[in-house]
Image (cartoon, helix red, strand yellow):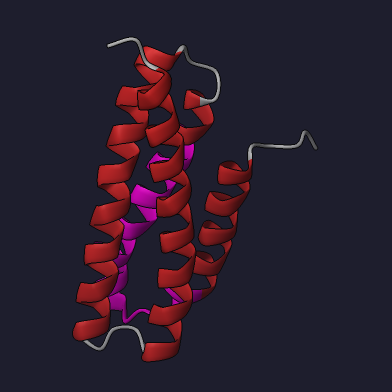
Amino acid sequence: PRPYLPIIQSIIELYKVWQRVLPHFPSSSRHTLGFRIDTLIIQIAEFLFAAGFMIDQKKISVIERSSFKIDSIKFLLQLSWESKIINDKKYILLSKHVDRVGRQVGGWLKKLKQNSPL
């Protein structure tokens, strides 16, 4: 396998953890809230992978969209936790991975904006 950017590795790790948590969602929430979180993680992975091949101006837009989607995941995980769909341990584990991806996206975005001739 080809080595990926560290941020891609992080989103892959997040997805692996998520896939261990999702089956424990109650059926009624798995097909709504669980599916939405799953979709967001996959979309972020696709955006970040594609951004690795883009020119900086387009890259900024895609990474900003990824950042918004990360915030959406944080909100939906909190909603899942507050609704007692996931327990404290799973919430903390997922939050650590989401925060890591968020920090990496934020750092990448900051670097691109600093280097951007706007």
Over which residues does the magenta segment extend? 21-46
| The image quarter in which residue 52 lies | top right
Q: Could one spot residue 24 in this view of the protein?
A: no
- Tell me the residue at 30%/59% (across/down): 73
* Residue 74 coordinates in the image, percent (x, y): 29, 63
* Residue 10 coordinates in the image, percent (x, y): 57, 53
Residue 94 located left or right of residue 34: right
| The image quarter in which residue 76 lies | bottom left
The answer to whether residue 109 is above or below residue 15 is above
* Residue 2 coordinates in the image, percent (x, y): 77, 33
Quadrant (top left/top right/bottom left/bottom right) for the C terminus: top left
Is residue 112 or residue 49 the one in the foreground? 112
Residue 54 located left or right of residue 82: right
Quadrant (top left/top right/bottom left/bottom right) for the N terminus: top right
Query: Outermost residue, right direction?
Result: 1
* Residue 31 coordinates in the image, percent (x, y): 29, 65
- Tell me the residue at 53%/31% (across/down): 49
The answer to whether residue 68 is above or below residue 100 is above
- Residue 29 belongs to the span the image colors magenta: yes
Is residue 1 or residue 6 the one in the foreground? 6
